[in-house]
Image: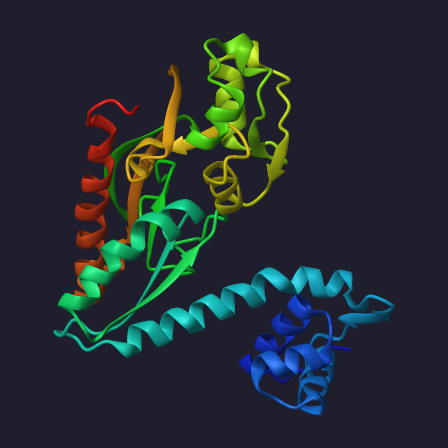
């Protein structure tokens, strides 16, 4: 029978930590609590919802169906609580407090740091949380305040700015070309060492649709991590797709088969309720200006 008392929000925070780490002790370390306290939180939450949330196994604590059903609601509580703290961190008229920015791994690690460094130099009381992940965080649910996205936003409650198109081309490091030469045709490309994702992605589907002759292409180096793929290309392992504006920063990267291109439509989005927030407004504007400058690299002189 369910308890009539409403569980503490702290219980849901603990619940998410146990879900993530799979043990009471690891969750306790993450939260800065004792293991008995974490155990009491889980016991109290189970009593409140009237269901067992975890079962013990050799792999640790495994979530039950009841736990998996609660997970999205607990995640919403966590993101809302984090957004509340960010909102409370800034004053009404001063650019201060915390802004959470979400972007893809490549944009988040290779492009945004320089933009954000200049922004924070101008506003030293501004705190940036950067989530660099290919998983899309929900701006409407306030998982992030501002997001750089490669798809057009569908929600009407978002303030959106279309930045333009980031173009990707095929590149290889000079060291790879010295060992293996350049492919001069799509057919020749099949005989080279190719770098790609170990699962179907939007890039791969886009490439197969635009260049059907490459359907079934195999990769000699695969990863599900965008930065690992970039580092593999820069290490000379093989040929892979790379953002053209980013490639212009490295003289050792050589463009191959320029007729093969992929395009990423790029947007910056923010919840419309945040447009009056000074810290979010200046961050939004800085991202727009910085990414517009970055995309201009698409139109620079041809790469070697």
The image quadrant of residue 223 is top right
Q: Nearer the viewer, residue 175 or 46?
A: 175
Residue pictured at 79% horizontal, 73% vertical: 52
Name the spot of residue 198 as percent of width and height, x first: 63, 36
- The total of numbered circles placed on residues is 0
Asked if one can make out residue 211 in the rendered structure from this viewpoint, the answer is yes
The image quadrant of residue 26 is bottom right
Q: Does residue 85 lie above or below 234 as drawn?
A: below
Left-right relation of 242 to 293:
right
The colour scheme used to paint the residues is rainbow
For the C terminus, the quadrant is top left
Left-right relation of 160 to 262:
left
Name the spot of residue 183 as percent of width and height, x first: 48, 14
Left-right relation of 255 to 199:
left
Q: Does residue 256 lie above or below 62 as drawn?
A: above
Residue pictured at 19% horizontal, 28% vertical: 300
Q: Nearer the viewer, residue 36 or 235?
A: 235
Residue pictured at 55% horizontal, 34% vertical: 237
The image quadrant of residue 193 is top right
Name the spot of residue 79 as percent of width and height, x first: 46, 66
Q: Nearer the viewer, residue 145 or 183?
A: 183
Q: Does residue 57 lie above or below 170 as drawn?
A: below
Q: Does residue 263 lie above or below 190 as drawn?
A: below
Residue pictured at 36% horizontal, 46% vertical: 107
Q: Residue furthest front?
A: 178
Name the spot of residue 131 as percent of width and height, x first: 42, 58
For the N terminus, the quadrant is bottom right
Asked if one can make out residue 173 in the rendered structure from this viewpoint, the answer is no
């Amino acid at each position: 029978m369910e308890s009539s008392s409403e569980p503490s929000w702290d219980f849901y925070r603990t619940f998410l930590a146990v879900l993530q780490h799979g043990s009471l002790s690891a969750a306790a370390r993450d939260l800065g609590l004792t293991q008995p306290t974490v155990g009491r939180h889980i016991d109290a939450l189970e009593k409140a919802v009237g269901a067992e949330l975890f079962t013990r196994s050799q792999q640790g604590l495994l979530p039950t169906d009841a736990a998996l059903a609660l997970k999205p609601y607990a995640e919403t509580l966590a993101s809302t609580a984090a957004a509340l703290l960010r909102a409370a961190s800034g004053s009404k008229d001063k650019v201060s407090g915390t802004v959470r920015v979400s972007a893809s791994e490549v944009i988040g690690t290779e492009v945004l740091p320089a933009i954000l460094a200049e922004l924070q130099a101008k506003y030293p009381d501004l705190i940036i949380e950067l989530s660099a992940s290919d998983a899309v965080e929900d701006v409407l649910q306030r998982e992030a305040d501002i997001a750089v996205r490669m798809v057009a936003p569908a929600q009407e409650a978002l303030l959106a700015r279309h930045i333009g198109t980031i173009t990707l081309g095929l590149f290889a490091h000079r060291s790879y070309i010295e060992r293996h030469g350049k492919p001069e045709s799509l057919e020749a490309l099949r005989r080279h060492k190719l770098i790609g994702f170990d699962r179907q992605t939007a890039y791969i589907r886009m490439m197969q649709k635009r260049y059907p002759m490459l359907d079934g292409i195999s990769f000699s180096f695969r990863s599900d991590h965008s930065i690992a793929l970039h580092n593999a290309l820069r290490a000379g392992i093989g040929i892979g797709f790379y953002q053209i504006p980013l490639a212009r920063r490295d003289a050792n990267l050589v463009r191959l088969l320029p007729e093969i291109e992929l395009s990423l439509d790029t947007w910056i989005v923010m919840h419309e309720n945040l447009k009056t927030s000074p810290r979010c407004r200046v961050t939004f504007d800085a991202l727009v200006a910085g990414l517009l400058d970055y995309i201009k690299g698409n139109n620079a002189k041809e790469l070697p």
